[in-house]
Image (cartoon, rainbow, N blue to C red):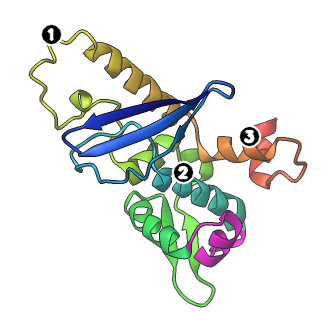
């Protein structure tokens, strides 16, 4: 049995079509509803920028211990296009998360130790301020803020999410991902496991 849900957001002219599969409990995206939201809109999901950017930084943490890592090597290992990774390097450099080395033996390195780079720093660099609802955005001035019954709830949920992202570092991810039975943990994880 498939249930369809259509929703319409007049501001962004965005139609979302999804199907719920009761057996698996998953929602599947059905339609090619790909119109752009205005940049002023706050979205609730993390984009591929954050997912791929996190994978890129994890790759740098794992393979950058012996020197700069080339984008082409990351692209091959992570199965992400070189052009997309090059787009991600700009905001990551601006945020001070990675550095570049020029030359024939050049590439990219983490600008900080993996234990000093939190997921919230990555999300902030690639997505901007991450709030679940627009009324809690710093630049927003909602006239209903004082009377809204759900405002505090959304603020607490956003705060909890941001705290959780701030508590997880690249080192945590690297060691957790690799500890699923893989005995070849990077040397970075030695101190973490003790």
Q: Decide: is 194 above or below 108.
A: above
Q: Residue at x 46, y 28 (%)?
A: 161
The tag on residue 13 is none
Looking at the image, the residue that sits furthest to the bottom is 104
Q: Is residue 6 left or right of residue 25?
A: left
Q: Decide: is 129 above or below 49.
A: above
| Residue tagged 1 | 147
Point out residue 97 in the picture as x, y percentages from the top left corner: 48, 58
* Magenta stretch contains residue 78: yes
Looking at the image, the residue that sits furthest to the left is 143
Q: Residue at x 50, y 74 (%)?
A: 100
Q: Residue at x 49, y 75 (%)?
A: 83
Magenta residues? 66-81
Point out residue 155 in the picture as x, y percentages from the top left corner: 32, 21
Q: Residue at x 71, y 59 (%)?
A: 62
Quarter residue 145 falls in: top left
Mark 1 lies on a secondary structure that is loop
Q: Nearer the viewer, residue 14 or 186?
A: 14
Q: CA distance from mark 3 to mark 2?
A: 17 Å
Q: Is residue 33 left or right of residue 167?
A: left
| Residue tagged 2 | 51
* Magenta stretch contains residue 148: no
Q: Is residue 193 left or right of residue 13?
A: right
Q: Nearer the viewer, mark 1 or mark 3?
A: 1
| Residue tagged 3 | 176
Q: Earlier in the sequence, mark 1 or mark 3?
A: 1
Quarter residue 40 falls in: top left
Mark 3 lies on a secondary structure that is helix
Q: CA distance from mark 1 to mark 2?
A: 36 Å
Q: Decide: is 33 above or below 10.
A: below
Quarter that holds the N terminus: top right
């Amino acid at each position: 049995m498939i249930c369809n849900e259509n929703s319409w957001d007049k501001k962004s002219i965005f139609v979302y079509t999804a199907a719920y599969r009761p057996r698996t409990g998953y929602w599947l995206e059905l339609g090619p509803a790909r119109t752009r939201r205005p940049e002023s809109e706050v979205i609730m999901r993390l984009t591929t920028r954050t997912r791929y950017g996190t994978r890129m930084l994890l790759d740098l943490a794992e393979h950058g211990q012996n020197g700069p890592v080339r984008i082409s090597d990351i692209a091959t290992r992570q199965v992400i296009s070189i052009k997309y990774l090059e787009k991600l390097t700009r905001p990551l450099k601006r945020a001070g998360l990675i550095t570049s080395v020029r030359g024939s033996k050049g590439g990219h390195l983490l600008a900080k130790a993996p234990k000093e780079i939190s997921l919230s720093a990555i999300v902030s660099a690639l997505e901007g301020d991450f709030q679940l609802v627009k009324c809690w955005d710093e630049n927003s001035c909602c006239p209903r803020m004082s009377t809204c019954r759900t405002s505090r709830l959304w603020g607490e949920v956003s705060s909890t999410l941001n705290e959780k992202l701030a508590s997880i570092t690249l080192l945590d991810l690297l060691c957790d991902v690799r500890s699923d039975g893989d005995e070849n943990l990077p040397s970075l994880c030695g101190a973490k496991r003790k």
